[in-house]
Image (tube, rainbow, N blue to C red):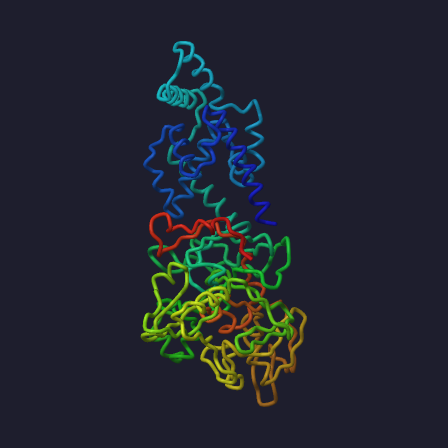
């Protein structure tokens, strides 16, 4: 639904921009063609066109785009601050209104007047002549109706305005993300660029409002923190359009990302500590802590809701004792044995299949159910075996990382996901499961003494949760760092709902095949 609303509003804004282009003496379609539209605006404004190259540079392109866009809007006399704000924040309202308003004229009618005068002198005007008239009219307009700001002030206004607008949009409406890893293959592919809605579940108020624009947690180029914890705002979420639903694809802040080893951020800090020991980790790496909203972003499928009973048996997920949802494009890994001809690895990679040789005639391959049937039918394939961990065999870095729970990624549970208002007993069996949620996420002190457990200094034998929690897993079951490693995801870590891919870049492709055209504007389910 949000995708439909977004597309409709975009079309309405594009229609308004179309009409403004027509008022400027250009064809309306030129307004809606990316890059070409900015080239035409540069010509209208008499600006050098070389700077359009900057449109392909992230962050810089935002400033270039809005500088051109706002200068073009100024040509219609829309120079006041609120008009600039409206042009950026609600273009689907003001652009059609200005396009329809007969009193809103391009260069206050000077271009139309000068063009009419030129046409009276010449029967037919060429494009170069029209362009000359346009530039002369623009110059006359700036002289006759001076916009009393220096170039530095104009750029400063554009930069400040673009920064504020982009920050508000990214913080409260939509944010773009790129898929860097294969944890959601084949549902989401490495190189997918997608939009995530903050509105669906309600946007969070920023925990750390003092931050460097367009940076998440690390300063670009120079490194170091891109935020200040001088001001900290407690968790608060504005109302949204919907509640989180089971099996939604969600972007959230990494629960285990509160502490990171700066030089080795691919492995969670707590996994490093379990592997190397705390002292060794602190000696070898720079350790940094991060507030919730500055922790690394992850994208997974919400397979478990607050209060759900979760378990996994032989690689099959169970939710409330029923088989869980399996995404059509989810995949598992298999050991494939072939005859002496082997497999064509290049062909498999071109098909988007991840393959790695084990030894001659043996391969480890990640496949969806359809791909499994396809590969199985090949004449040179002798056998295929799904790779599964055995029940009762503990796997390193598997939640809750406690000796009494001999769990692994294919066999764990059952246990209940915490729900707001749910009360659990505090004992040796429940503390490994819920201790981190109680202490770290809900900010309580929990201390073991000879006569029992003390919660915030008072003896306690139970705890009632203050937040809802979720269980997030990747569709690529055996190539995903997810809740099976770090456990529950608190509600205050939820960023937004993944809506659709707007671009998909295939690093292994060539020429036009670098872009996965069939994934552009593909909805995420």
Vertical comparison of 359 with 296: above or below: below
Q: In front here: 20 or 261? A: 20
Q: Residue furthest bottom?
A: 450
Q: Position of residue 453 (x, y in %)?
A: 60, 84
Quarter of the image for the C terminus: give it. bottom right
* Residue 431: image location, x then y, percent: 57, 81
Viewer-proximal residue among 14 and 367: 367
Place residue 492 in its image quadrant: bottom right
Q: Quadrant of residue 65?
A: top left
Residue extending farthest to the front is 379
Number of labels in the image equals 0
Instruction: Please tell me whether residue 21 is drawn above or below residue 520 in the rendered image.
Output: above
On screen, residue 58 versus residue 410, left or right, reads left
What residue is at 59 percent from the left and 52 percent from the top? 199
Left or right: residue 411 versus residue 52 is: right
In front of the other: 502 or 44 = 502
Q: Percent x, y for residue 346?
A: 34, 62
Q: Residue at x 50, y 64 (%)?
A: 370
Work out whether 363 lies above or below 37.
below
- Rendered position, 190 above or below 55: below
Horizontal arrangement in the rendering, residue 233 relative to residue 162 (left or right)? right
Nearest the eye: 122 or 306:
122
Q: Residue, x 46% and y 27% (percent of image)?
A: 27
Q: Residue 144's spot in the image, x, y percent?
A: 44, 20
Left or right of 463: which side holds 180?
left
């Amino acid at each position: 639904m949000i995708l439909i609303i977004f597309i409709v509003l975009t079309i309405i804004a594009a229609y308004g921009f179309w009409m403004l282009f027509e008022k400027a003496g250009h064809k309306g379609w030129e307004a809606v063609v990316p890059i070409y539209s900015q080239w035409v605006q540069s010509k209208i404004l008499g600006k050098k066109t070389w700077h359009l190259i900057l449109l392909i540079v992230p962050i810089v392109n935002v400033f270039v785009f809005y500088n051109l866009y706002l200068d073009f809007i100024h040509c219609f006399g829309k120079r006041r601050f609120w008009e600039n704000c409206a042009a950026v924040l609600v273009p689907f309202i003001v652009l059609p209104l200005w396009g329809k308003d007969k009193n809103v004229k391009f260069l206050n009618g000077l271009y139309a007047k000068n063009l009419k005068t030129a046409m009276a002198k010449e029967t037919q005007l060429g494009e170069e002549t029209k362009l000359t008239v346009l530039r002369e009219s623009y110059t006359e307009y700036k002289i006759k109706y001076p916009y009393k700001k220096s170039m530095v002030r104009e750029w400063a206004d554009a930069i400040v305005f673009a920064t504020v607008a982009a920050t508000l949009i990214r913080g409260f409406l939509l944010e773009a993300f790129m898929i860097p890893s294969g944890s959601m293959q084949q549902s989401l592919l490495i190189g997918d660029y997608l939009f995530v809605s903050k509105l669906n579940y309600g946007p969070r108020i920023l925990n750390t409002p003092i931050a460097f624009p367009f940076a998440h947690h690390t300063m670009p180029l120079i490194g170091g923190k891109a935020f200040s914890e001088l001001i900290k705002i407690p968790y608060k979420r504005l109302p949204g359009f919907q509640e989180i639903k089971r099996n939604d694809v969600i972007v959230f802040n990494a629960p285990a990302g509160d502490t990171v080893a700066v030089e080795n951020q691919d492995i969670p800090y707590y996994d490093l500590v379990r592997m190397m020991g705390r002292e060794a980790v602190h000696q070898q790496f720079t350790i940094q802590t991060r507030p919730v909203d500055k922790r690394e972003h992850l994208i997974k499928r919400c397979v478990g809701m607050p209060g759900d009973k979760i378990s996994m048996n032989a690689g099959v997920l169970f939710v409330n004792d029923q088989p869980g949802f399996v995404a059509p494009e989810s995949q598992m890994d298999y050991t494939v044995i072939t005859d002496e001809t082997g497999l064509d690895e290049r062909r498999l990679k071109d098909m988007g299949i991840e393959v790695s040789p084990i030894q001659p005639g043996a391969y480890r391959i990640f496949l969806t159910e359809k791909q499994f049937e396809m590969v199985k039918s090949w004449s040179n394939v002798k056998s295929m075996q799904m790779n599964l961990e055995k029940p009762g065999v503990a796997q390193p870095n598997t939640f809750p990382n406690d000796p009494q729970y001999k769990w692994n990624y294919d066999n764990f549970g059952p246990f209940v996901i915490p729900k707001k208002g749910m009360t659990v007993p505090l004992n040796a069996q429940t503390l490994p499961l819920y201790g981190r949620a109680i202490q770290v996420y809900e900010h309580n002190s929990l201390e073991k003494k000879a006569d029992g457990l003390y919660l915030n200094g008072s003896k306690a034998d139970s705890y009632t949760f203050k937040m809802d929690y979720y269980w997030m897993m990747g569709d690529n079951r055996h190539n995903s760092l997810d809740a099976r490693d770090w456990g529950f995801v608190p509600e205050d870590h939820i960023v937004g709902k993944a809506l659709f891919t707007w671009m998909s870049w295939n690093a292994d492709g060539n020429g036009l095949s670098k872009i996965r055209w069939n994934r552009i504007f593909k909805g995420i389910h």
